[in-house]
Image (cartoon, rainbow, N blue to C red):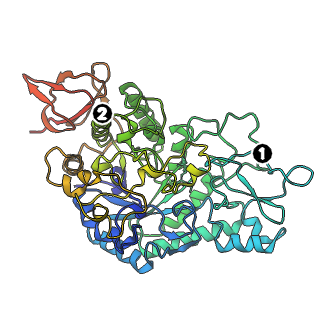
Amino acid sequence: AKRGDWWRDAVIYQVYPRSFADSNGDGMGDLEGVRSRLPYLRDLGVDAVWLSPFYASPQADAGYDVADYRAVDPMFGNLLDADALIRDAHGLGLRIIVDLVPNHSSDQHEWFKRALREGPGSPLRERYHFRPGKGEHGELPPNDWESIFGGPAWTRVPDGEWYLHLFAPEQPDFNWEHPAVGDEFRSVLRFWLDIGVDGFRIDVAHGLVKAEGLPDLGSHEQLKLLGNDVMPFFDQDGVHDIYRQWRTVLDEYAGERIFVAEAWTPTVERTANYVRPDELHQAFNFQYLATDWDAEELRTVIDRTLEAMRPVGAPATWVLSNHDVTRHATRFANPPGLGTQIRTAGDRDLGLRRARAATLLMLALPGSAYLYQGEELGLPDVVDLSDEVRQDPAYFRGAGQDGFRDGCRVPIPWTRTGSSYGFGSGGSWLPQPDGWGELSIEAQTGTAGSTLELYRAALAARRTQPDLGAGDSVEWLRAPEGVLAFRRGEFVCVANTSGESVTTSAYGRLLLASGEVTEADGEAKLPADTTVWWTTTP
Ligand code: TEU
């Protein structure tokens, strides 16, 4: 039985529609594919599904370049499919969160096309950031900002003006100082709220407002997403005014709908600014995602997160993987300190063992957790994709942020064998590696000890154990070096992040373990990289 607001301890599953399930055999996943697999997600035990963008888009950045915010791309289906998906999900007790991309549009958006056509001085240009260039003939970009995907953040158009794009040139940034932009997005919110979505994930939520005058970065240290100074294009105070307005729109609608911010801010304390009672409900915890599999580092980020969220009354969130980073089964297979983008497969067994342990730790923490499709199968990143098949613009633009994102986007294996391992009847837009079917849902369903069954058991336990997920604190217990141990009411979690087996007390009835735990005389032996859950209830 769930208590309080559903989202405070919700487990939310990210579907990346192009890679989830393909209903029409074109090699690309689609909304009908997602709809047909909703029973799987219900049985997995998640509370809600977040769908990455499925709007009309030229797909320069896999749909994060939106040409029409009120239309479904034909590649994914149509509005009736979206409606059917939402209705079926609700029928199964699943909520649907859609992605909103307000920082930039596609260069094929009607506004941008007109702005280009109409030329310098066009009022449409004021909805984006058009500027004359510097230098004698305007041949230099207006300032020194770099794109997150690499290269300058400015592109020159044939009439000589330049426009700003924090991401690819096909993704011009909106000018949020212009009232038409705000009006449009409030209307887009209503459009999807009226259709029945339960919330929005806000893309680049920290980027909408740029510092007045678009000042040069100058002596700022080089652009980094985490741990940097505040950049003139990120985390400006003005973004909070936008979200206060959005909140009043959302609150007009019944049914506890939510906003979750994708905000790569320097610290979890700055992230907390987005989740005040009159703003957004949740924000992704990227500090947690970027933490290595190390007890001390994990404990520090857990404490800091809970401390930052407590005063604003927002739930902490936890996330290990998404469509922008190397899957955690591969990150943890590599030496620590490499960040969120890894180029080698590393030791697969080690990575999987740690990923399973990390997941049980995450799902024992108070607050809400985000899962990325395929992590419940223990999928690794595919690190040997050829340039011919890759599609990530960050990869091809030099990847200022080390973007190697195709590897975590390879379509899901549903069956052991068969065309694209059950993803669809017509191949898959990124090639699936040999043996992918051994990791499939079919191969893991009902298989004792499989990663899928571990996730199922953990999510089922979150429903039956009231102390899991709820609350806003953990009580740390004494533990050997490299081990995290905490109590939450009648529940105890112990995570051994060290490379050696450790002995701890057995804290009650063993609920679940990510590896082989042996108990004797009130003590428990945990192998390396293993997490255990105990309950003190009989
Ligand atoms: O990502 C924002 C972001 O800054 C990073 O995740 C970035 O894409 C990555 O580190 C580059 O290597 C969001 C979306 O999640 C991402 O898929 C989009 O590409 C991006 O916005 C632009 O819309």
- Quadrant where the N terminus lies? bottom left
Residue 493 visible (yes or no)? no
The response on whether ligand 1 sits within 8 Å of label 2 is no
Q: Which residue is mark 2?
A: 350
Is 338 or 504 nearer to us in this picture?
338
Q: Residues within 10 Å of mark 2 (few under 14, many from 20)?
A: some
At 33% from the left and 52% from the top, the residue drawn is 374
Q: How many marks?
A: 2
At 79% from the left and 71% from the top, the residue drawn is 123
Residue 27 in the figure: left or right of residue 396: left
User: Percent x, y for residue 537?
Assistant: 12, 39
- Quadrant where the C terminus lies? top left
Q: Which residue is mark 1?
A: 215
Identity of the residue furthest to the left in this view = 521
Residue 232 in the figure: left or right of residue 64: right
User: Percent x, y for residue 157?
Assistant: 78, 63
User: Percent x, y for residue 73?
Assistant: 49, 73
N-terminal-most mark, 1 or 2: 1
User: To which quarter of the image does residue 33 belong?
Assistant: bottom left
Q: Disc 1 to disc 2, how far (Cα)?
A: 46 Å
At 84% from the left and 69% from the top, the residue drawn is 121
Is 28 or 178 nearer to us in this picture?
28
Q: Secondary structure under badge 2?
A: helix
User: Percent x, y for residue 36?
Assistant: 29, 71
Is 232 or 333 nearer to us in this picture?
333
Identity of the residue furthest to the bottom in this view = 80
Residue 534 in the figure: left or right of residue 118: left
Image position of 335 with respect to 30: above or below:
above
Q: Secondary structure under badge 1?
A: loop
Is 248 or 496 nearer to us in this picture?
496
